[in-house]
Image (cartoon, rainbow, N blue to C red):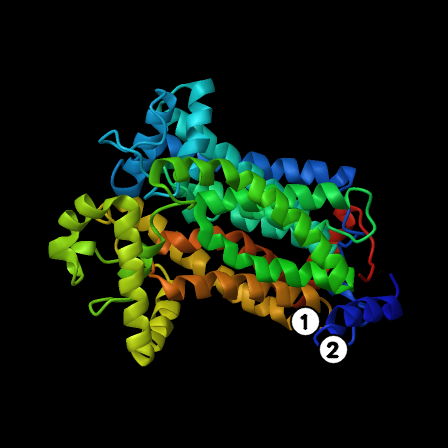
Amino acid sequence: MNDKTGRHRTAAGWRWIGLRYFFEREQVEGLGMLGTNDGRFRKRDAGLLLTILLLAIMVRTLASAMLPTPLESDYLGYWQIANNLHSGLGLVGADGTPTAFLSPGYPIFLGQVFEVLGPTIATVKAANIFLGATSVAFLYASALRLFGSRLVAALAAMIFATYSESIVYTAYVAKENLMIFLICTQLFFVVTARPHDSWRFANAVLFGMATGCLAVVGNAALALLPGFAFYVLCKDGQIIVTCKYFFIAFVFAMLAMWPMLEHNHQAFGHYVLNNNGGYNLYIGNNPNATPFFESIADTPLGPQWQILHQELGEYGVDQLLRKKAIDYITENPTKTLILAARKALAFWTPPIHEGKYSSSAGEKIVRVVWLGQFLLICLMFLVASSRFRTYPDQIITLWLLVGGYTAVHMMFYVIYRYRLPIFPVLSLGAGLGVEVVLTTLCPRWILAISNFFGTTQKSL
């Protein structure tokens, strides 16, 4: 599209809130945009993506073969629920009673996979490898559509495909594997949603289904919705068109969530997705709270926990903890705000902590690599903001996604693995940031790579 059309479409997205679009899009010239196309998947993309996918599958398979699968804490809970589902017992815990304390989406997914491949750890790892590889594919396609650059798409996909933490968690019975897949799916549908496309309705339906499934798997990721809505609005240019899209998505999200809501209504007498919201809020907001997860035994209700759980049940005690947390927040607003700021800092603290097997040479090496990757990805994400004049909608969207996901954890508490699902978004920004650095320091290399890709220079 030409420069005038680009300015008009972006400005239209801002009119509904009365803001003036103060950064003009400009015709991009020079090596910074070499390796671009119209954002559509071409034959050349297939070979490039296949190479990246083979690498992603290879490193994840290797890690799964070498790493143990710890069955403890949440991992054990997911494993037990998935096995109980496979055995026909339903969504019940180790004691055989109905449970929704752990978000049930991931064990439901594993239960279905177990029906085909059998209830083994190898099956869990194979499923996680599939989820990881598919996430990389969606990430490549999303970056290609978002930035119109095959080079940026390849860099973003490669960054996440080789990110140590995402590789290591392939060996874990962890819901983050499925959350990443669903977030990448959401991202793909959002960036491919266009107001006059023939598959606009189907796009909204699929986005809604992915969102509903994500709510069942890990509802903290619903904090990404404002960022997604902003991007769709910018592309639509009219708020009514965007509202129609999200209304359709909402309807089908509710359809995706309804079986879980109905199940929990029958089991606990209430329409809830899980019974852990109050628990998590209280852990992060009580007189003894720190930025990080602490055992319920370390809170003021610790001595009464078992008795309360038996008397009130899983749903009742969750509601009690929610009330206690809200009371503490309203009575201590200043302390809560200070603690929330500390949580934000803790959430983005580089991984310098020691792991369970830190004494082994292998883990020490992996942790050094992980630290280096973490710092580099975050730095390149920041560098990507230098392209704001070229990609204003995209840069704002990325920051809204990261900010929203950070904000929801400021309400609760920090566990380092909880930030893993947002790393596909960081990888998008990092891919653009690396492209900025390469075009600045190594312009001839970029020209050669662009010629190899067979692409031409265009403006978005």
Type of amino acid under label 2: Phe
- Looking at the picture, tell me which residue is in the foreground, 273 or 232: 273
Task: Pick whichever of labels 2 and 1 is earlier in the sequence.
Answer: 2
Name which residue lies at 67% across and 40% down. Answer: 48
Image location of residue 364, percent across then percent down = 29, 50
- Residue 352 visible in the snapshot: no
Type of amino acid under label 1: Phe
The quadrant of the rendering that contains the C terminus is: bottom right
Image location of residue 318, percent across then percent down = 29, 52
Name which residue lies at 31% across and 39% down. Answer: 75
Crowdedness near tag 1: few (<14), some (14–19) or many (≥20) residues, C-alpha within 10 Å? some
Q: Could you tell me which secondary element the residue under label 2 belongs to? A: loop
Looking at the image, is 437 positioned above or below residue 305? below
- Looking at the picture, tell me which residue is in the foreground, 97 or 444: 97
Determine the residue located farthest toward the front in the rendered image. 269
Looking at the image, is 337 positioned above or below residue 29? below
Return the residue at label 1: 388
Crowdedness near tag 2: few (<14), some (14–19) or many (≥20) residues, C-alpha within 10 Å? few
- Residue 177 visible in the snapshot: yes
- Looking at the picture, tell me which residue is in the foreground, 364 or 126: 126
Return the residue at label 2: 23
Q: Check residue 78 in the rendering and tell me which mark sits there, or answer none.
A: none
**285 horizontally vs 392: left or right:** left
**174 horizontally vs 12: left or right:** left
Question: Do the numbered discs 2 and 1 sit on residues whose CB atoms are within 8 Å?
Answer: yes
- How far apart are the alpha carbons under marks 2 and 1? 8 Å
